[in-house]
Amino acid sequence: MAVLSDHGMKFFRSSTNQDAVPAAPQKLNRRSSGMGEISRLLNSQEALCVLDIGATSANNIRLLTGKGHKNYSEDLLRASLDPALRGKDENGNIVVDSKKFLDENLVYGNARFDVVLIWNLPDYMEESLVKPTIDRLWSVMKPGGFLLAFFHTRDAGPDSTCYRYHVTGSDMLDMQEVKFALPGRPASEKQSPRLQRVFNNRHIENLFRDFASIKFFLARDAIREVLVVR
Amino acid sequence: MNDAPQTGEFAHIGKSVVIKGELSGSEDLYVDGNVEGKIEMRSHSLTVGPNGNVKADVTAKSVVVQGKLDGSVNASDRVELRKSALVTGDVTTQRIAIEEGAFLKGKVDIQKEAGKAGSASS
């Protein structure tokens, strides 16, 4: 786990709620204003280059390639949990090697993206990887390209379910709980990643300060959608 | 589904076999061992079994992956990624099917044949 600093964020790591009963895997859906705007772009233009950094989704690949777009898949949350990224600093604190992470991920040669779907990644990823990841994404996006991200609000608890998102072609998203082996746990013991923090609006704006514009959409399910233009 | 070959129509690389170099052939190939280099099957299929570990750029008519494959995949017909598949590399094909649980890190480029559309399914 990374050495943490407080930038106006609320952390949940000290929570000891062990009573939560894991829900059976199921697909839910939600209406997404941000995805609605992305869908309009996908439906009106051809041969866009789309980067999906959620879990591999056959649904998303089918929909995007079916519309004639190029689809890149990269499960960054899973990649960020690689034990090989973890070491200790001089004080014995566990740190995550962001340089090694970026050497091994988000490397696309000459490819530049029109659309990047990062879903809820920043809320579940190690903090020390978040800003370097956003900076790298800026560098691989085309000017005018769109990035869609979801951020939990303060109403979300630390045990908020981590979902993966399946695009349906409109403003509706299918959601499915994410579960995989976490660092330090047996491979057979799959768990849903825990919410690492809640970003406030100012921190979100700082995170995307190099981008041209940022638009917030408030939803009723303790999620803020953020649509950013490179 | 078990894709292990049931007849002698497949060339079979067992799980204890390690091959480094270039593989090509005129019959379907099932790899359950380790292959590092390049695989060119052109008009035949390649299946990477659950124990297979392939580090190679692959060219074949169809490719089915149950194990691990690091390298680009160019399949003139179709690609299937089964639920245990771990694929790192770009995939170029006409059709792709991906089972729930499969892992893919790379680009998917559907090359449409005239009159046909690319598809991916769970």
Image (cartoon, rainbow, N blue to C red):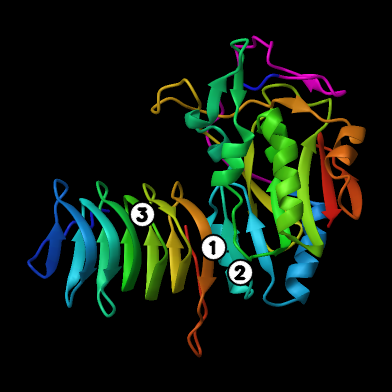
Are dots 1 and 2 in contact, CB under 8 Å?
yes
- Which residue is under mark 2? A70
A40 inside magenta stretch: no
Q: CA distance from mark 2 to mark 3?
A: 21 Å
| Horizontal arrangement in the rendering, residue A79 relative to residue B65 (left or right) | right
Given the image, on which type of amino acid does mark 2 rest?
A: Lys
| Horizontal arrangement in the rendering, residue B95 relative to residue A157 (left or right) | left
Rendered residue at 74%/55% (across/down): A139
Q: Chain of mark 1?
A: B
Given the image, on which type of amino acid does mark 1 rest?
A: Lys
Q: Position of residue A146 (x, y in %)?
A: 79, 59
Q: Residues within 10 Å of mark 3 (few under 14, many from 20)?
A: many
Rendered residue at 57%/47% (across/down): A105
Q: Chain of mark 2?
A: A
Residue B107 marker: 1
Rendered residue at 64%/9% (across/down): A16
Q: Position of residue A72 (x, y in %)?
A: 58, 60
Q: Quadrant of the C terminus of chain A?
A: bottom right
Residue bounds of the magenta highlight: A4-29
As helix, strand or loop, the secondary structure at mark 3 comes to: strand
Q: Are marks 2 and 3 on the same chain?
A: no
Choose the circle earlier in sequence order: 1 or 3: 3
| Residue B89 seen anywhere in this rendered image of the structure | yes
